[in-house]
Amino acid sequence: MTDHVLALDLGLAKAGAATLTADGRVDTWLKTSPTLATGAGLEATADRIGVMASWAVGLATTGTILAVVEGPAHAAQHGQPHERAGVWWAVVRRLLHHQIPVAVLAPSTVKGYIAGKGNATKDDVKRAVALAWPGQGLGRISADEADAVAMCTCAADWLGWEGPYLDGRRGVDWLRKAQWPDRENVRA
């Protein structure tokens, strides 16, 4: 398996993922989960968390040299933060158990890096991702997949890989805001 970065934009209803190889190959995935019925019990919620976490961790392979996960959106006023945290911690724990180094990027860091401003809209991020990786067909991906590609792009820059096509490396200052693993723990 070719060495690559895996990025995960985790959620309960849907999650986006992307991989990026050192030679610039991008692949994306979108996972959706049906909404739980009102009053669903703990078992149903735990199962939903387990399904999403297993899907995300299942994308990691022997070629995954670094996993990047989007950190919590502390300002979010919707959804189920407790359950989303469950998915997040289940994924991070399993990745670390498999000795895959993990980086954490705040949503504003991802947006700022790829689109130039920390409060960029989903459409801004999608547009910036498609411009950064021309010829990859990324203009048709979901916002969740675009976030994952943006995180892969951050990681590639941090690793010193060639590309992407960001004007004047505007994202470098944003990289300093991320929580990166010790570089010696990443085989690149």
Image (spheres, grey):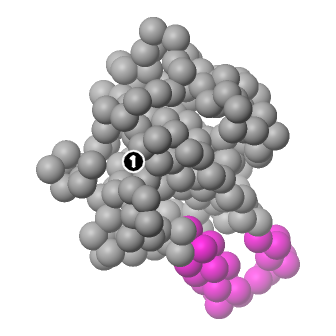
Give left or right: position of 111 versus 124: left
In magenta stretch: residue 84: no
Which residue is under mark 1? 104
Q: Can you give x and y, in whole percent of width and height, for residue 167 in the image?
A: 52, 11
Of 134 and 145, which appears nearest the observer?
134
The majority secondary structure of the magenta stretch comes to: helix
- Kindly state the secondary structure of the residue where label 1 is placed: strand
176 to 26, vertically: above or below: above
Give left or right: position of 114 versus 61: right
**Residue, x 76% and y 45% (percent of image)?**
142
The span shown in magenta is 33-56
Of 111 and 163, which appears nearest the observer?
163
Q: Can you give x and y, in whole percent of width and height, for residue 109 in the image?
A: 47, 31
Q: Residue furthest left?
A: 184
**Residue, x 79% and y 80% (percent of image)?**
39
In magenta stretch: residue 52: yes
Specify the quadrant of the image occupied by residue 130: top right
Specify the quadrant that holds the N terminus: bottom left
Q: Is residue 177 visible?
A: no
Assess disc 1: are there few (<14), some (14-19) or many (≥20) residues with their C-alpha within 10 Å of its C-alpha.
Answer: many
**Residue, x 43% and y 51% (percent of image)?**
5
Q: Amino acid at mark 1?
A: Val
Q: Can you give x and y, in whole percent of width and height, for residue 182 in the image?
A: 18, 48
**Residue, x 76% and y 66% (percent of image)?**
32
What number of labels is visible?
A: 1
Give left or right: position of 139 versus 157: right
